[in-house]
Structure formats: C-alpha cells, structure tokens
Image (spheres, rainbow, N blue to C red):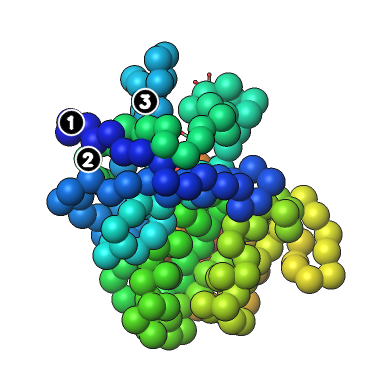
C-alpha cells in the first residue's frame, strides 16, 4: 500500500463531535466522490493505527477534506484527532470505495454514513444537477445533523431528516421505517444509495425488500 504524508492545513469542529480536517493533496492523488482512504496520524504510537475515512470535498480541489465524527469513549484514532493542530501530519493510503454516483435516486444515511454523499451531492450541486435526488438522513438528535444548512441549500425539500432520540417540532421522530420510506419514494426508484452503521443498514435492507425494491438498485457501504 502506498503511503502519503500530508500536512493539516486547517482543522475545526463543525458540530459538537464532528471535525472537518483539510489537508494537503499528494501529487497525482485522484478520487471520485464517494471514495475513501485509510488514514493514520503521523505521531509516535499512532502511525500504524489506520482507519477508513471518506473524502468530502470535490476531486478538482487542490486540497483534501475529511469530515470525521469523533468517539472519545473509544480512546482510538478519532479521539486522538481532537488533539491535532495545523501542520501536524496524517498518513493516507490508496483510494478505495464502493459508492459511486450513477443516476438520480434516493440517498439514505445514518450519522457519519452521510460522508460519501457529501462529495457526491456537492459535485451534483456544483454542476447544477441535483435534480430530484433526495437525502433521507437519520440521526439521534438535531445537534448530530452534519452540514444541515448546506444540505438544505442544495436539496431544499428533498433533504429529509428523522431523529431517533429527540422529539422536535421541526423534524419527525423515530427510526427509518418502511412507512417513513414509503412516504418519500416508491418501487419505481432507480437507485438507492445507502450508508450507515451495520444495524441501520440491516433494518433498512429489510424494509426496502418488503417494499419490493429490487436489490440491484441498491448501492451501499457500511461505516
Ligand atoms: C469505507 C469507510 C469510510 C468511512 N468514512 C468515514 C468518514 O468519512 N467519517 C467518519 O466519521 N467515519 C467514517 N467511517 C467510520 C470510521 O472509520 C470510524 O468511525 C473510525 O474508524 C473510528 O475509529 P476510532 O479509532 O476512533 O474508534 P474504533 O476503531 O471504533 O475503536 C477503537 C477501539 O475502541 C473500542 N470500541 C469500539 N467500539 C466501542 C464502543 N462503542 N464503546 C467503547 N469502546 C469501543 C475497541 O476496542 C476499538 O478497538 C468510515 C468507515 C468506512 C468503512
């Protein structure tokens, strides 16, 4: 596996537990929206701790952007990233990834599972091609919604949220159930892009199958 050391250009929190890290981009390092790489921290004791993260900016940018939900309780890499500063270094591996945009469809994301869709939707928006793409985004509470304003600007009413642990006037409450999905699309959907934690993926798979959605239209990855 190739290794690329890159300096951090900027690092900031974009909500209570999510970091946006912008780094240098290695020469000839190309990715498509939706792809990811293994990342480790270039510090003693952390160099071999690789974790997968998705590029969230546009391929043509001359930097790389990562949007990283941190888990202090795991005492792992994302917790250590909270200590990083400008000019600290990350080590990146090769580019890989299962999710690539084909054509218009429905994006279903849970929590940090939205990350492959950030770059895809930003690229569509920058080309004026968001069309009737929809993003169904499940989170525990309102404070967990990553980039709410940007998704809302890009997708308008096609940005659909649901909160599992908070009752609010603004958003529906509950999990992504079959009823909820059926309110927003039907079996004529051409592409369903899915990314989230394994329990959510399992549940949504079952619901899509009960709705009669062909599994060949599903493009997915677990986070
Ligand atoms: C292809 C792909 C792309 C991804 N892209 C992104 C992305 O762009 N942004 C993003 O935020 N995430 C992304 N993820 C998820 C991300 O890789 C993980 O959140 C990250 O690896 C967590 O690393 P960590 O070292 O902090 O914790 P972990 O590696 O999860 O945990 C470190 C250690 O903590 C312990 N542990 C595990 N779970 C718990 C728990 N629940 N409570 C207490 N301790 C625990 C275990 O001993 C574990 O070894 C992606 C995942 C994949 C597969």
Q: Secondary structure at mark 3?
A: loop
Location of residue 59 (image quadrant): bottom left
Q: Which mark is residue 1?
A: 1
How crowded pointer 3 is (Cα within 10 Å; few <14, some 14-19, many 20+) is rated as: some
Position in image of residue 147 (x %, y %): 58, 62
Report whether residue 21 is seen: yes
Instruction: Give percent across and percent down for residue 10.
Output: 48, 47
In contact (CB < 8 Å): disc 3 and disc 1 = no
Tag 2 or tag 3, which sits nearer the N-term?
A: 3
Could you say where residue 64 lies in the image, as x and y percent from the top left? 35, 52
Pick whichever of labels 3 and 1 is earlier in the sequence.
1
Answer whether residue 189 is visible to the viewer in this image.
no
Q: Position of residue 203 (x, y in %)?
A: 55, 51
- Mark closer to the chain start, 2 or 1: 1
Residue farthest front in this picture? 87
Query: The N terminus appears in which quarter of the rendering?
Result: top left
Q: CA distance from mark 3 to mark 1?
A: 16 Å
Whether pointer 2 and pointer 1 mark residues with C-beta atoms closer than 8 Å, the reply is yes
Mark 3 = which residue? 42
Q: Residue at left 63%, top 29%? A: 72
Q: CA distance from mark 2 to mark 1?
A: 6 Å
Q: How far apart, in angstroms, are the residues tagged by discs 3 and 2?
A: 16 Å
Q: Is residue 142 left or right of residue 217?
A: right
Q: Are marks 3 and 2 in contact (CB under 8 Å)?
A: no
Task: Tell which of 165 and 80 is nearer to you.
Answer: 80
**Residue at horizontal 64 percent and vertical 26 percent from the top:** 73
Q: Residue at x 73, y 58 (%)?
A: 142
Query: Element type at marker 1?
Result: loop
Q: How many marks?
A: 3
220 vs 75: above or below: below
Left or right of 20? Residue 71 is right
Q: What's the mark number on residue 94?
A: 2
């Amino acid at each position: 596996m190739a290794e690329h050391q890159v300096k951090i250009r900027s690092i900031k929190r974009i909500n209570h537990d999510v970091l946006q890290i912008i780094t240098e981009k290695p020469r000839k390092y190309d990715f498509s929206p939706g792809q990811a790489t293994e990342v480790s921290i270039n510090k003693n004791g952390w160099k071999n701790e690789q974790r997968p993260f998705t590029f969230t900016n546009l391929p043509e940018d001359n930097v790389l952007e990562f949007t990283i939900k941190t888990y202090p309780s795991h005492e792992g890499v994302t917790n250590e990233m909270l200590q990083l500063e400008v000019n600290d270094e990350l080590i990146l591996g090769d580019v890989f990834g299962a999710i690539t945009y084909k054509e218009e469809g429905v994006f279903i994301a849970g929590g940090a599972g939205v990350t492959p869709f950030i770059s895809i939707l930003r690229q569509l928006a920058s080309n004026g091609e968001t069309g009737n793409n929809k993003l169904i985004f499940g989170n525990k509470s309102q404070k967990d919604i990553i980039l709410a304003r940007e998704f809302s600007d890009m997708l308008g009413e096609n940005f659909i949220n649901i909160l599992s642990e908070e009752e609010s006037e603004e958003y529906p409450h509950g999990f992504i159930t079959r009823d909820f999905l059926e309110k927003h699309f039907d079996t004529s959907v051409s592409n369903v892009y899915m990314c989230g934690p394994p329990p959510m993926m399992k549940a949504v798979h079952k619901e899509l199958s009960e709705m009669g959605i062909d599994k060949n239209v599903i493009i997915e990855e677990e986070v």
